[in-house]
Image (cartoon, coloured by chain):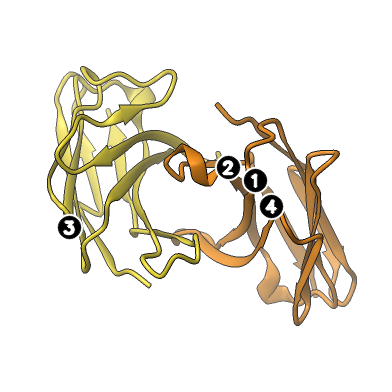
Amino acid sequence: SAVISQKPSRDICQRGTSLTIQCQVDSQVTMMFWYRQQPGQSLTLIATANQGSEATYESGFVIDKFPISRPNLTFSTLTVSNMSPEDSSIYLCSVEDRGGTGELFFGEGSRLTVL
Amino acid sequence: GENVEQHPSTLSVQEGDSAVIKCTYSDSASNYFPWYKQELGKRPQLIIDIRSNVGEKKDQRIAVTLNKTAKHFSLHITETQPEDSAVYFCAASASNTGNQFYFGTGTSLTVIP
């Protein structure tokens, strides 16, 4: 299993500002995944963060809007830049089980509201 | 990338009845198919999973079936209970593509007491 801590848990932001979400894992992991869950919607993969290399972004997501850092094997940040109300969402950090079961563990999520 | 479709989007059943949720996927390379349960305001949590070398897997009241030829898999919940009420997501992953998980659109299950 993995224990994942995210912060902030929630925030209210002004249009045009940027916010950085932090994700801390209790063990070293190769890949960390960032998902977005818009209200009442599914989980959409934003990007995969690898330590020591640039993040890999999914179609529809770009680095300028969602820059990601991965300074070590237990930590990652996701920044939501130049926010608009459409960015209001829950952002979840996740990692795969190190035991090789394939299970994906999620953080509690960061609920962002953009006014 | 992978495209996962899930039906129905909402499902209401009487307590004690069975519930079935179906998913299809597009990428034949996908070989791992988990199901996640998300209660209101909480994080998704794995309830059962199946790999491509298995056709069916059961864990107490929950079972999952996989038809790799048709690229679809299903979640079956028997003897439903009110605490089964939640949103359920299917997902697909191909271990040779960095283990990214692609989720279905979710099914909101309500079990009526």
Q: Distance between the residues labelled 3 and 4?
A: 33 Å
Write down the residue under mark 1.
B106
Please provide percent x and percent y for residue A80: 23, 29
Residue reaching furthest to the right: B17
Q: Give me the disc on residue A74.
A: 3
Q: Distance between the residues labelled 2 and 4?
A: 14 Å
Task: Check contact, mark 2 vs mark 1: CB within 8 A.
Answer: yes
Please state which of the two labelled residues, at mark 3 or mark 1, is closer to the viewer: 3
Hue used for the chain lettered A? yellow
Please state which of the two labelled residues, at mark 2 or mark 4, is closer to the viewer: 2
Please state which of the two labelled residues, at mark 3 or mark 2, is closer to the viewer: 3
Task: Check contact, mark 4 vs mark 1: CB within 8 A.
Answer: yes
Q: Give me the disc on residue B103.
A: 2
Residue at (69% x, 71% y) in the render: B84
Hue used for the chain lettered B? orange
Write down the residue under mark 4.
B108
Q: Where does the N terminus of chain A fall, quadrant-wise? A: bottom left
